[in-house]
Image (tube, grey):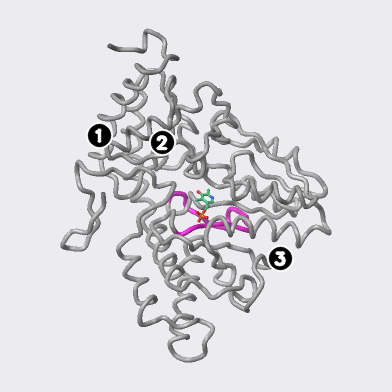
Amino acid sequence: MFIHNCEGDAVTIENKLIYMDNSATTPVRKEVVEEMLPYMTENFGNPSSIYEIGKISGRAVEKARKQVADAIGAEENEVFFTSGGTESDNWALKGIAFANRDRGKHIITSSIEHHAVLHASAWLEGQGFEITYLPVDKYGMISIEELKNAIRDDTILISVMLANNEIGTIQPVEEIGKIAREKRIYFHTDAVQAIGHVPIDVKKMKLDLLSLSGHKFEGPKGCGALYIRKGTKIETLLHGGAQERKHRAGTENVPGIVGLGKAIELAAGELEETNKHLLQLRSRLVEGLLKVPKTHLNGHPTRRLANNVNVTFEYIEGESLLLLLNATGIFASTGSACNSSSLEPSHVLTACGVPHEIVHGSLRLSLGRLNTEKDVDRVLEALPEIVQRLRNMSPLTPQEYRTL
Ligand SMILES: *Cc1c(COP(=O)(O)O)cnc(C)c1O
């Protein structure tokens, strides 16, 4: 799919593989790899060491911290590196819960969060905390009224994601932030999908905690960060050495952190340009897909990530669709990647009220910076035929949607 041409630029090989699963993960950008390489070879020192090669690593980590801070409007000492989005979400929820349990045991989140938040919440319930899962409307939006009504005297944390990984819906984070700050409740957002697509300013959004993950914006896997606003009372998740100012033990993933820093700088710097490109592709793709009869767009029509397309085809089994697409060299996803090995219907689509009979016919195509109009056209050439083939085979398809 992507190779490096003789100038070293990533190019898509036409008529070969088309990757449209960028919400699952992204390829690491060439500039990012180049930045990382020296920290796996000559600059291998441990940032905690006091001799020169250790200090070189330490300075590289601090440079990356500034890159992350600048990209989200934070101070450098408010950024903590982690092993990715999952750890950041777990740290935010468990860390706030246990540090503030003398104030209360109630947490508010939404029913469409990533499993890193939902399963951490379920675990906290087992530890005696009470969780309210806010419902969403058919577009995947929470209601501010319902949020206000859910707040109790013992509410200590609100965790609502910035943009959803399955349907791309963008939540009214600034409004939530205002309410949380007024009520003196901590506010965490999972911004893993939003980085590089939604401009982020932690001060304007009145955030206390924000999770991000390198591999969702063309950085390396296994490296993320948690923004923790100065003065926030939070427990440590990993105990051990004094790394990350004693807040997160473990020798730093120096190459990963360096890559994350470079990737977020590029993603935030090119946000407008990238979104413009993705919006063009998205409109073309959605328009083409909706020409297929009995097809529905999931998520919000406008308040959504520029790279996200999620549709449901009636009378179709999503897994079969994926396999046939795979056979034509097109890589996509049914719900979220985490669901693709289970037969459970997507909790996000179910929460949006997509009927049980059709929820299994859902497909997520998530675009990336490297996708082209040609990629979109090839998908639009291949997909309707595959859908028709599957409909012809399904006993559920009414006669008028079959062809011979
Ligand atoms: C991918 C993702 C995560 C998990 O991040 P990892 O770095 O893969 O652990 C969390 N939240 C959302 C919204 C995601 O898309």
Q: Which residue corresponds to mark 3?
A: 235
Q: Is residue 167 above or below residue 291?
A: below
Q: Report whether 41 appears left or right of 3.
A: right
Residue visible at 62% across and 37% down?
A: 142
The image shows residue 271 at horizontal and vertical percentages of: 39, 53
Q: Which residue corresponds to mark 1?
A: 377
Q: CA distance from mark 1 to mark 3?
A: 50 Å
Ligand 1: does it lie within 8 Å of the C-beta at label 3?
no
In terms of image quadrants, where is residue 184?
bottom right
Q: Which residue corresponds to mark 2?
A: 309
Identify the element where label 3 is drawn.
Answer: loop
The span picked out in magenta is 197-214
Residue visible at 73% across and 48% down?
A: 107
Identify the element where label 2 is drawn.
Answer: strand
Which is more N-terminal, label 1 or label 2? 2
Q: CA distance from mark 2 to mark 1?
A: 15 Å
Q: CA distance from mark 3 to mark 2?
A: 38 Å
The rendered magenta stretch, by its main secondary structure, is classed as: loop
